Each structure stands twice: as structure tokens, then as C-alpha cells.
Amino acid sequence: MDSILALASRTNLSAATLAAFRSSIEDYWRRDDQHGGEALRPAIVGQLRYVVGLLKENRPSSIQNGLYGIAAELARLTGWTYFDARQYNQARAYFTEALQLAKEIDDRQFMANVLACMSLQGTYQDKPADSLALVTAAQDQARSALDTTPRVLSMLSMREAFAHATLGNRDSTHRAIGEAHHQFEQVRSSDPDPSWVTYFDEPKLIVDTGIAHGRLGEAATAEPLIADALRREDRSNQRGRAFHAFWLARTQLDQGKLDQACHTATEALEPASAVASERVSGHLREFYDQLAPHRQEPVALAFEARLRALLPPVSGSLHL
């Protein structure tokens, strides 16, 4: 019935239609940061299928290429919502669809973006070699594009740092971090950055630098970087704030700062409970597991009580 009604009401697409699609995507980005992707996913998938249906008709190349780019981002965003829910097989399927759509218009920067998402997922699936291979492929794609900007290259170098850190490659991690900062120093306001990379601002560069050091076990280096970025981060980004507070707590715990770590992790619980992100919730349950040697300490008991109240265990997750 939906397809019949769509056929009956179809009108010629214009540049204004493409702009409306892109505006809705930007709205999805904002709401995903604030609330998580679980509730958004049906709308994103519905719009993806609608746009893919539009691609079956012959249209001017400018409109058709725009539709391919919009469909590619809707597919990537769907994959991202599944990744954030730790549903990795579904995420990979949509990331693959996003790659195929972007390849149709030879958008190499965007293909690099999707490969970078897949690389990040590899670090969560304990597949660090795959993660490194994917981000290396992403960098190859980006460098082969004539319009790739320093901000894109900086983001990709930071994802490379994550992959090396997960593998325990200290020197390679430090080299990739240095390259990320070098590229970011080249960023200019006049750069033709694609909209999907504008989130990678200075606080994001700083916090990711801290996380990369934290993954290496360099907690003393990581802690002030993550703390500084948290102070500067947009407060409406609930998932980001919860995620970064978890990493700050972890670096504090790694240095034996039990009281401080539990306080920081407790502060992460409120934004984590406000956003539907099993990835973030899982990290905070993992932090509770890391408290095992200190379970009877008052600060650990207080954190456990708040964790149980705000993030109760769910089926298939770590149990308290």
C-alpha cells in the first residue's frame, strides 16, 4: 500500500528536495547524540528504503548523485545505530550497503568514513588486525580523493591510533596521534569539509587523544586530556559525555584513584541513562567489573547502588 500511494503522489525531485533530506539527516545526528539511535532507527530505515526506491527512476545526474549520497549516509547512520546497540552483524550489513551506495558515485571521502566506522567496530569485536586493515583502507580511499580535507585525514589518523593502541603498538600509536594533530593544525574554516566530519572539532581531537593513550595503559597522560575535553564538550551530547566520563574514570582507576574514579563514573550514569546506548551502558558495567578488588569500599558500593538504579542489567549484557 505504501508503495502504491508513493507512486500516486510522486513529484519531480529538485535541489530543494535534496536539501530537505539532508536537513532531516542532520536532525537525526543531533537526536542520536542526545537520545541514542534506538528510537530513531525505524524512521531512518524507512527513509533509506524510500530514497533507494527513488534511485530506480531516471533523473538528472545532479539529482541522482545527490540521492546516492543521501542514501549512503542513511545506510551508514543505520549501521551506526546498530553498532551503538552492539548488534554488530546488523551494523556490518548496513555499513556494507553504505559503501556500495557511495561507490556508485565514487565518493571516496565518504567511503573512507564508512570504513573508519567499521574499523572502530573492529576494536569492539576484539578484531584489532581487522580494525587496522579497515582504517588503512579508509586512508587509502581518502588520499585518492582530490577534495579530501585535513579534518578528514586527522579523524582517520585518530582511528588508526585506536587500532594500533588496541594491538598494543605503542610507537605506531604515538606516530598516528602525532599525524592526527599535524593534520588538524592544517584545518581552515574555508575548507570544504563534508558535513559528516564537522563533529571532529578540537575537543573531540583532544578526548580521542586521551582515549588512545588510555587504551595503551598510559593513564597519567590520558587523564588530563580527557578531563579538559569533557569541560569543553557540548552538554547536549549526552552519549559523548557519558562515554568520555567512563574513560576518565577508567584512567583514574588505573592510577589507583579509587574515590575520584567512582565519583566520575557515578557522574556518567545520569547522561548514560538518558540515552539509549548499550555501548555506553556496557562500558559502565565493565567499569563495575574492574572494581572487583574494591567492592566493599563505600565509594564502590555507592556506585553500584546508582548503577543498579539507573542502568539495570538487560538480557545478554554483563550482570551485576
Image: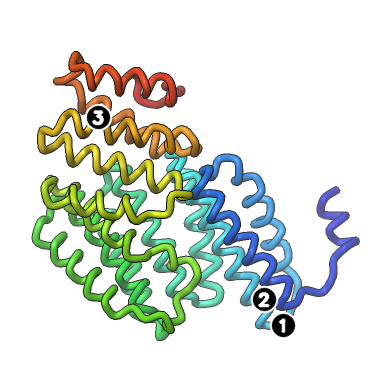
Relative to 80, is 233 on the left or the right? left
- Residue type at numbered disc 1: Pro
What SS does tag 2 mark?
A: helix
Give the residue at mark 1. 60
Distance from Cα at disc 2 to Cα at disc 3: 52 Å
Among the 4 quarters of the image, the one containing residue 62: bottom right
Distance from Cα at disc 1 to Cα at disc 2: 6 Å
- Residue type at numbered disc 2: Gln
Across and down, in percent, residue 281 comes to 39, 33
Instruction: Please rate how many residues cluster around mark 1, counting C-alpha atoms within 10 Å: few if below 14, some from 14 to 19, many from 20.
Output: few
Across and down, in percent, residue 195 comes to 50, 70
Give the residue at mark 3. 262
Specify the farthest residue to the front. Answer: 231
* For residue 165, above or below residue 88: below
- Residue type at numbered disc 3: Cys
Across and down, in percent, residue 142 comes to 37, 75
* For residue 250, above or below residue 28: above
Q: Residue, x 46% and y 81% (percent of image)?
A: 192
Q: Residue, x 26% and y 31% (percent of image)?
A: 263
Q: Nearer the viewer, mark 2 or mark 3?
A: 3
Of pointers 2 and 3, the one earlier in the residue sequence: 2
Q: Residue, x 22% and y 59% (percent of image)?
A: 161
State yes or no: discs 1 and 2 in contact (Cβ < 8 Å).
yes
Across and down, in percent, residue 260 comes to 20, 33
Distance from Cα at disc 1 to Cα at disc 3: 58 Å
Give the residue at mark 2. 64
Q: Residue, x 85% and y 66% (percent of image)?
A: 10
Of pointers 1 and 3, the one earlier in the residue sequence: 1
